[in-house]
Amino acid sequence: MRGIVILGAWMLLAAMPAQANDLHAGYYYPQPETREVYISEVPMANDATESSRAAFVVGLAAQQLKQSHAPGYHLFAKGAELEKIIIVATGPERYDNLFRMRALLASLTSMARATPLFAQSAQPYELNFLDFCKLMGFEQVTVSNGDNFAHQITIR
């Protein structure tokens, strides 16, 4: 019994830093309800830097502005080295479940394929948005409906 209590306490403590280090939860999005780890076989690009991650986010925002309608989400790069992407819906009933969030990520794959760095990949059409994030050096993607639901993906 004592071993189970110690194991339980250790597991609780091991999980706490990941939650405590998320300074953006409660500000840009609610505490994530769901989490997953995405393992990408794509190596990080040698020229992936804080500046290239910032340029990527600015480029995606510029693509949104070219559309004839208001964007359905806002995209931010955050973290000490801009290693996190935050995507937040701009209105109600958008990206309010895991399936809609994954559809958004699939849509972002198409947008990312238009960037020069994605085209440098040996097989760009076999990669998805999360692979591209890994290539750029992003370590985490959080998608939220901006109200009461958030999903967080750790990229390895």
Image: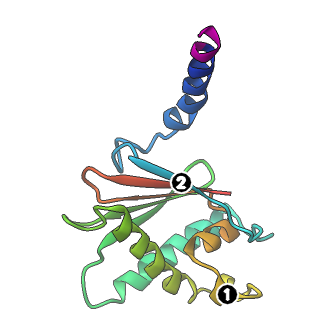
Coordinates of residue 142 in the picture (x, y in percent): 46, 56
For residue 9: magenta?
A: no
Disc 1 + disc 2, Cβ < 8 Å: no
Question: Which is in the foreground here, disc 1 or disc 2?
Answer: 2
Q: How many marks?
A: 2
Answer with mark 1 or mark 2, whichever residue precedes in sequence: 2
Residue at disc 2, secondary structure: strand
Q: Where is residue 115, by image quadrant?
A: bottom right
Q: Is residue 29 above or below residue 108?
A: above
Coordinates of residue 155 in the picture (x, y in percent): 62, 58
The magenta-colored residue range is: 1-5
Which kind of residue does numbered mark 2 sit on?
Answer: Glu
What residue is disc 2 on? 36
Q: Is residue 149 above or below residue 67?
A: above
Distance in Å between CA atoms under marks 1 and 2:
23 Å
Q: Is residue 116 left or right of residue 46?
A: left
View extreme (right): residue: 46
Q: Is residue 122 left or right of residue 71?
A: right
Which kind of residue does numbered mark 1 sit on?
Answer: Pro
**Quadrant placement of the C terminus:** bottom right
Coordinates of residue 7 in the picture (x, y in percent): 62, 20
What residue is disc 1 on? 124
View extreme (top): residue: 2
